[in-house]
Image: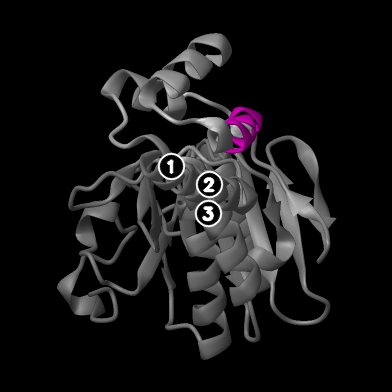
């Protein structure tokens, strides 16, 4: 480890001289010690990672992944979104979106150097979540003055994230869970939770109507059953009313031929 300087040349250091788990990053060959985070920082990091990793457009993300745009630089954002392969070793290049958490004891000059290094290596957005003072997120992009977003506002990363991210979702567990639920539903083809509830209601209505039809006319022919399942909610409502007059499967078949 770099903490034992005698194991290494006097410098400058190269990224391949560090091993996975060494508590250092490199800035132009100069080691920067990266110490463990406090509880608040760690919990916020986990919440933000949940909200971001589940986004429908995100294929890869990771915590503390080490990126090496060249042999003299090694940077590990708190959260990296994109370009995180499932392979050992440092990652070449930079993540499209990087998130840093700044809490008490933050080394501000080092943070700004890290932001410049990431943007210079190809990162499109760096979000700095400030956990001290008023909660806020600083947004950094190449060649654009930084901006700030506050609770109640949303962050966007076009081409990286499908959905806007509420500022609170980067640190608050309830907001992160809500964003993750939305994201996971969209990954399954549902726009939101209301769509799941609606599908559940329709499935319940369909099951009830099928039971009522079997009581009224007996076994339902497979072709008629398939037609029933193609009915929308208004069609099911109409069938529920009409079946009161059915006496045989022929009545059901005739009705379906007229309405499906």
**Label ID, residue 52:** 3
Residue nearest the viewer, comparing 35 with 196: 196
**Label ID, residue 188:** 1
Quadrant including the N terminus: bottom left
Hey, which residue is sitting farthest front in the picture? 247
User: Relative to 8, does residue 59 appear above or below in the rendering?
Assistant: above
Q: Secondary structure at mark 3?
A: helix
Relative side of 46 to 14, left or right? right
Task: Give the number of the mark in front: 2 or 3.
Answer: 2
- Whichever of callouts 2 and 3 sits on the residue coming sooner in the sequence is 3
- Residue at position x 58%, y 53% in the image: 197
User: Relative to 249, does residue 69 appear above or below in the rendering?
Assistant: below
Q: Residues within 10 Å of mark 1 (few under 14, many from 20)?
A: few
Q: Secondary structure at mark 1?
A: loop
User: Relative to 211, does residue 167 appear above or below in the rendering?
Assistant: below
Which residue is denoted by mark 2 in the rendering?
205
Task: Give the number of the mark in front: 2 or 1.
Answer: 2
- Residue at position x 36%, y 57% in the image: 65
Q: Secondary structure at mark 2?
A: helix
The answer to which image quadrant residue 174 occupies is: bottom right
Q: Is residue 7 magenta?
A: no
Residue 135, position as x, y percentages in the image: 78, 74
The answer to whether marks 2 and 3 mark residues whose Cβ atoms lie closer than 8 Å is: no
- Whichever of callouts 2 and 1 sits on the residue coming sooner in the sequence is 1
Residue nearest the viewer, comparing 186 with 87: 186
Q: CA distance from mark 2 to mark 1?
A: 22 Å
Residue 117, position as x, y percentages in the image: 54, 48
Q: Is residue 236 magenta?
A: yes
Task: Give the number of the mark in front: 1 or 3.
Answer: 1
Q: Residues within 10 Å of mark 3 (few under 14, many from 20)?
A: many
Relative side of 140 to 25, left or right? right
Q: Which residues make up the magenta segment?
A: 234-242
């Amino acid at each position: 480890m770099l903490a034992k300087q005698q194991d290494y040349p006097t410098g400058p250091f190269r990224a391949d001289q560090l091993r996975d788990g060494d508590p250092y990053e490199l800035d132009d060959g100069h080691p920067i010690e990266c110490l463990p985070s406090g509880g608040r920082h760690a919990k916020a990091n986990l919440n933000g990672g949940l909200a971001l990793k589940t986004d429908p457009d995100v294929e890869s993300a990771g915590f503390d992944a080490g990126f090496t745009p060249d042999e003299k630089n090694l940077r590990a954002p708190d959260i990296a979104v994109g370009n995180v392969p499932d392979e050992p070793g440092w990652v070449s290049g930079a993540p499209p979106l990087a998130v840093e958490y700044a809490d008490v004891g933050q080394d501000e000059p080092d943070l700004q150097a890290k932001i410049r290094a990431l943007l210079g290596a190809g990162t499109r957005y760096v979000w700095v979540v400030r956990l001290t003072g008023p909660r806020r997120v600083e947004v950094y992009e190449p060649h654009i003055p930084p901006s700030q977003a506050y609770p109640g506002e949303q962050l966007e990363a076009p081409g990286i994230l499908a959905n806007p991210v509420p500022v609170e979702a980067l640190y608050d567990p309830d907001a992160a869970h809500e964003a993750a639920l939305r994201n996971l539903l969209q990954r399954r083809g549902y726009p939101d939770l209301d769509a799941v509830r609606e599908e559940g209601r329709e499935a319940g209505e369909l099951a009830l109507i099928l039971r009522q039809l079997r009581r009224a006319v007996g076994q339902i022919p497979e072709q008629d059953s398939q037609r029933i399942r193609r009915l929308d909610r208004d069609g099911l409502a109409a069938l529920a009313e009409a079946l009161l007059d059915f006496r045989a499967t022929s009545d059901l078949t005739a009705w379906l031929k007229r309405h499906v």
